[in-house]
Image (tube, helix red, strand yellow):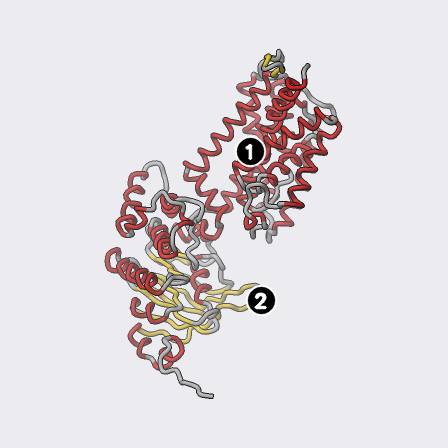
Amino acid sequence: MLRIKNINTYYGKVHALKNVSIHVNVGEIVALIGANGAGKTTVLNSISGITPPREGEAIFKGVNILGLPTDQIVKMGISQIPEGRQIFAPLTVSTNLELGAYHRYSRKNKSSLKKDIEDVFSFFPILRERRNQIAGTLSGGEQQMLAIGRALMSKPSLLLLDEPSMGLAPMISKDIFRMISRLKDELKTTILIVEQNAKAALQLADRGYVIETGKIIMEESSKGLLNNKEVQRAYLGKEKKEIWE
Amino acid sequence: MPLYSQIIQYVLSGITIGSVYAIIALGFNIIYNSTSIINFAQGEFVMLGGLTMIFFTVMLKFPLVIGFPLTVLVLTLIGIIMERFTISPIKKPTVVTLIIVTIAVSILFKGVAMLVWGKDTHFLPPFSGEKGIAFMGASLNPQYIWVVGITVVVVVLLSIFFKYTIIGKAMTACAVNRTAASLMGINVKRMVLLSFALSAAIGGIAGIIIAPITLMAYDNGAMLGLKGFGAAVLGGLGNFYGAIFAGLLLGVMESLGAGLIHSGYKDAIALLVLLLVLFIKPSGIFGVTEVSGFKKF
């Protein structure tokens, strides 16, 4: 579905992504794990056009999307749930959802949009209770659900999920991961997920990539990565050597 | 005239001029929200609105009902042209560059207006006669009712636009978070264009309704823009209802000050208020400190 090849992205003079190549197949959940500052978010932002890469190729459904503006990439079916949720805090929950379907909006399909909002509400019942509430007053977990629901409103064929567990209590982030796996089971959504909580992400995903200082250093099935000694030591917190002084 | 009817008189004219400041302030806010820049050509929109209306209704003798929408249309086009040719082509926009561009455009507008309309002050007849209506011992100019009425209509229409239409909501979304807005498939650049069109249109309306009271000349834009800017800052930049309240407050203070102290201080009062706000509470009466800082373009 999506194949990016040898992407190079810069922030000013900083070379943030070096020849990154990854692909996502239809129906798959792919996890991208790595340390802080390794370039995980930059990969997603490069795909969605927020930080357009300087070189490379990004083929989505047979079309090169590299260099297209973000709003057009969204229209083609890629929806990103940005880091830190980025909901429209002063607007209500239902307005946030409506805006998620902005590019599908027209007078004719108003009723189908209403139905889509209902679908999101039945997926996240708590949002129905909060529908007329100002989004900024929601709890962190609810805001994350709203961000996911808002992205679903655009009927994406590929969902880019950036750090869904960021800033959430462990219990809440467990809930969120459960919902993401429900997305896969019930809605058959294709997902590329970036996560610091490598274990949770890999348990969810079919396949994973490991990124380190802007380079992809490993690609394997999730199981393989979970059992990989190097990954276990660096990202899963196992086998750490105790140091006595 | 007893003092109390004098005061009523001043308050009435203050509310009238304040309504105009409020509309101008709303124009500043619309562009500020979508781009984080202060459009210093906002006052010129007002001047161009007044003079274009005079061109249509006095020189071409069109009736008001045709001249009014036509003027608003012309101003909308001017706003679009301004954005397309001066704001949007800039390769690496920063807040400061863009603000300087708007200053340049305002000088350009003033120059063009001087060439087209000359240096004379032009007169636009009041919409419905000049016979004052007696009101609590004061005399109410019928144009005042027009000004306040049209302001109310503009405010109501704008609120409906921002609250209930998808484009209005999208514009608000851009103001809140540009990146997230573009991730919704919103074309942020188009929203910027729209904000210029909208600001120019309502600036034009302000010019049309004020011209019968203050008359209009090519160089009136700067002062009107400055007062409107004062109102926008006083209400908290970007704050819709704050701008309306602050505009009215500024108008009434100016009018009372001019009437009770000295009419020469009319402009000084507004500018003094602007300075005081900037010294004491730069975020404005209703502003949050967070919003008062420049947003990243």
Task: Determine crowd level at label 2: few under 14, some 14-19, many 20+ residues with C-alpha closer than 10 A.
Answer: few
Q: Is residue A224 toward the left or the right of residue B257 in the image?
A: left
Position above or below: A152 against A39: above
Pinpoint residue A28: horizontal percent, then vertical percent.
29, 64
Q: Residue at x 51, y 68 (%)?
A: A16
Q: Residue at x 34, y 57 (%)?
A: A158
Q: Residue extending furthest bottom?
A: A245
Q: Is residue A142 toward the left or the right of residue B26 in the image?
A: left
| Res A102 visible | no
Badge 2 amino acid: Lys
Pinpoint residue A207: horizontal percent, then vertical percent.
32, 70
Please give the chain letter of the residue carrying mark 1: B
**Alpha carbons under labels 1 and 2: distance apart:** 45 Å
Q: Residue at x 65, y 25 (%)?
A: B51
Q: Identify the element where label 1 is drawn.
A: helix
Give the image quarter of residue B99.
Answer: top right
Q: Identify the element where label 2 is drawn.
A: loop
Q: Which residue is mark 1?
A: B244
